[in-house]
Amino acid sequence: PQVEIREGGATLRQGDPKSVKVQFTIKNVARECAAAGDSVVFKVGIEGLALIGAAGKPGPASAPLTITVTRGDKVVATRAATAKVIIPADEEQAQFRMIEDGIKVPPGVGDLAVTVGFKG
């Protein structure tokens, strides 16, 4: 199945809406899957950007993500993850790349769908 960014989950702003500290944005997603007996195991890659807002400063930043695998209307696997970056002192942004491996989906019948998105 294709991995998609959850509607409304592509961007996460941290801080007060009028004075954002950091804004995270997912730019690209990818997946690999492999059979493991009668189950399927997914590896999901997420790439994005963290931008310093008006109230932010360089340094470490992180944002919570959720990876969800559904079969029809039923959630069959979920994984909480964290996007982490260190924004250098002389920069206003930094890229993040992460891979979540070992997301195991139990056997079953029906098409699978994988979604990724920031919590919030």
Image (spheres, rainbow, N blue to C red):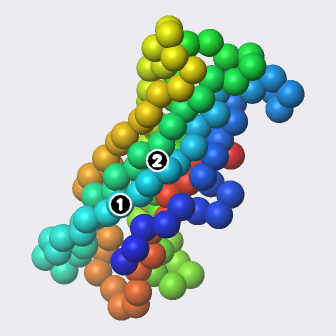
Residue 76 can be seen in this image:
no
Question: Which one is in front, 118 or 97?
Answer: 97
The percent position of residue 109, horizontal first and vertical second, equals 36, 91
Q: Which residue is mark 2?
A: 80
Look at discs 2 and 1 and give the one toward the viewer: 1
Question: Which one is in front, 28 or 103?
Answer: 28
The percent position of residue 11, horizontal first and vertical second, equals 63, 46
Residue 12 sits in quarter: top right
Q: Residue at x 33, y 86 (%)?
A: 108
Q: Please give left or right for residue 118 compared with residue 80 in the image.
A: right
Q: Residue at x 28, y 58 (%)?
A: 43
For marks 2 and 1, give the CA distance: 17 Å
Q: Please give left or right for residue 22 compared with residue 5 in the image.
A: right
Q: Residue at x 54, y 32 (%)?
A: 50
Q: Which residue is mark 1?
A: 30
- Determine whether 56 is above or below 67 in the image: above
Q: Amino acid at mark 2?
A: Ala
- Determine whether 84 is above or below 29 in the image: above
Residue 76 sits in quarter: bottom left
